[in-house]
Image: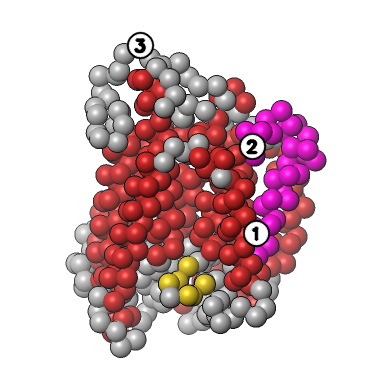
Amino acid sequence: MTPRVGRSVSTPRAAPRAPRAAAADLGLGRGWEAGALLAVTVALLVFGLATLFSASAYIAQRAQEPGHYYVVRQAVGATLGLVALAVCAWMPYDIWRRWSWHVAGAVWVLLLVVVLPGTEAIAPVVKGSRRWIRMGVTLQPSELAKVAIVVWTAALAVRKQAEFRSLRRGLGPFLAGWAVLLVPIALEPDLSTTVLVGLLGVVVVYAAGARLGHFVFLGLLTLPLLIGQLQEGFRARRLSAFLDPSADPSGAGFQVQQSLVALGSGGLTGVGFGEGRQKFGFVPEAHNDFIFAMIGEEWGLLGVLVTVTLYGLLVLIGFRIAGRAPDLFGQLLGIGLTSMIALQAVLHMSVGLGLVPPTGLALPLVSYGRSNLLVTLAAIGILISIARTSERVYYGGGRA
C-alpha cells in the first residue's frame, strides 16, 4: 500500500547524532539504499537484455534482420538510460520542483505533436494508433508523461496542503492539469497508458493527504466513461476474452492462452535459455508485451520467483528512500516514481498470468522499448538523488 505522508512531513528531520553502524559508504552517498537500488537495477537490466535476445531473435530474423537486431538497439537505449540515471542522480532532486511546469509543458507539446492532424510524417499511424515521434530517433511521449505527471503533481501538492479539504480548491487544479496530459494520450488512442498516468497522479495526491472520499466521488463520475470505452471495438473483444478465455481462443483470447501455455511449459526450472518455443509466432509481441511469459517458459518458476523478488526489492528500497526524504516534495516524488515502476511491473505480470486484460504495458528494464527504458532509468536516478540528499541531511547535519 502506498504510504501517506501528509502535511506533517514538510519539515526536514533532525540529523542523528552518529551514523548508523550498518550504513556503509557505497560511493553514492552514505547508507545502503542508493547502492542497493543501483545493484538491483543493473541485475534487472542485464537479465532483461539476455531475455530479450532470446525472445526477439526469431522476430528479428522473420523481419529479415540479424538475430541480435533488437537487443543491440535495446543496449544502445540502456547506455543512454544509464547516462540519464547518472545525470539525474547527480542533480539535486529539488530542481525538478522548480522545473515542474516546464517539464509538464514540454511533454504536453510532444503529446500534441503525436495526435494533431498534419503531423503524420513524423508521427505515423502504427497498428491503429499514433504513439511515436520519429525524427531519426523514435520517442514515445506518453512514457515521458509518466514522470511529468509525478513531478508536476508532487510540486503542486506541496503548495496545496492547506486546501485538500476542498474538492474545488484542493483537487480542482490537479484535475485540470491532469486532463491536459491525459486527453492527448487518450486520443492516440492508448487507454491503458491514460489510466496508468492518471493513477500515478492520484497516488501522489492521496499520499500528500487528499481525501479518499473525493476520489471515490470522482471515480463514480468517470466510471460510465470508462465502461463505455471498454465496450468499443478491440477493447470489448479483449474484455470478453478475459472474462471467458475459451470463447475465442484463436482470436481475442489467443495472446493470453499462449502466454499461459508458455508459463505452464516452463515447470520448475524452465526449458532452458533460448529453448522456448512459444516465441516462434505463438505469443505475439514476445519481446515486449508478453516477455514475462518467455521468462516463465525458459527460466521456469524459479526464474519467475527471482524476477518478482528483484522487483519487490526495487519497490521496497524505493519506498524506503521516499520515506526518508528530508522534505515533502522528496517524499511525494519518491512515492510517485516508485509507484510508476511497481504498477507497470504488476500489471505486465498480471497480463501474462491472465489476471487482467492485455494492457500493452512494458515490463520495466526487461521489455523491449527504449523510451520506457530511458524513462525508467532516469526515474531510478532521481530516487538515488533523493537517497543521497537524505544521507547528507542525516549525517551532515543539514541540507546539501
Query: Which residue is nearer to you in this view: 364 or 226?
Result: 364
Amino acid type, residue under disc 2 in the picture: Ala
Are the two marked residues, 3 and 2, in contact with CB atoms closer than 8 angstroms?
no
Q: Earlier in the sequence, mark 3 or mark 2?
A: 3
Which of 114 and 49 lies nearest the eye of the viewer?
A: 114
Which secondary structure, mark 2? helix
Mark 1 lies on residue: 182
Marks 3/1: CA distance? 46 Å
Residue 366 at x, y percent in the picture: 34, 60
Q: Residue 137 bears which disc, if any?
A: none
| Quarter in which the C terminus is drawn | top left
| Element type where label 1 sits in the image | helix
Could you tell me residue 86's position as x and y percent?
Answer: 34, 47
Residue 346 in view in this figure: no
Under mark 1, the amino acid is Leu
Mark 3 and mark 1 residues within 8 Å of each other at the beta carbon: no
Give the percent coordinates (x, y) of residue 95: 50, 40
Q: Quadrant of residue 388?
A: top left
Residue at coordinates 25% horizontally, 57% vertically from top-left? 46
Secondary structure mainly formed by the magenta segment: helix
Residue wearing tag 2: 157
Look at label 3 and name its amino acid.
Arg
Above/below status of 275 relative to 309: below
Along the polypeptide, which appears first: circle 2 or circle 1?
2
Distance (Cα) linking label 3 and label 2: 32 Å
> Which residue lies at the image location 66% right of the left edge and 33% below the top edge?
159
Instruction: Tell me the distance, in whole angstroms, between the alpha carbons under discs 2 and 1.
Output: 18 Å
Magenta span of residues:
156-184
Say whether residue 45 is left or right of residue 363.
Answer: left
Residue 74 among magenta residues: no
| Disc number for residue 17 | 3
Residue 321 visible to an observer of this rendering: yes
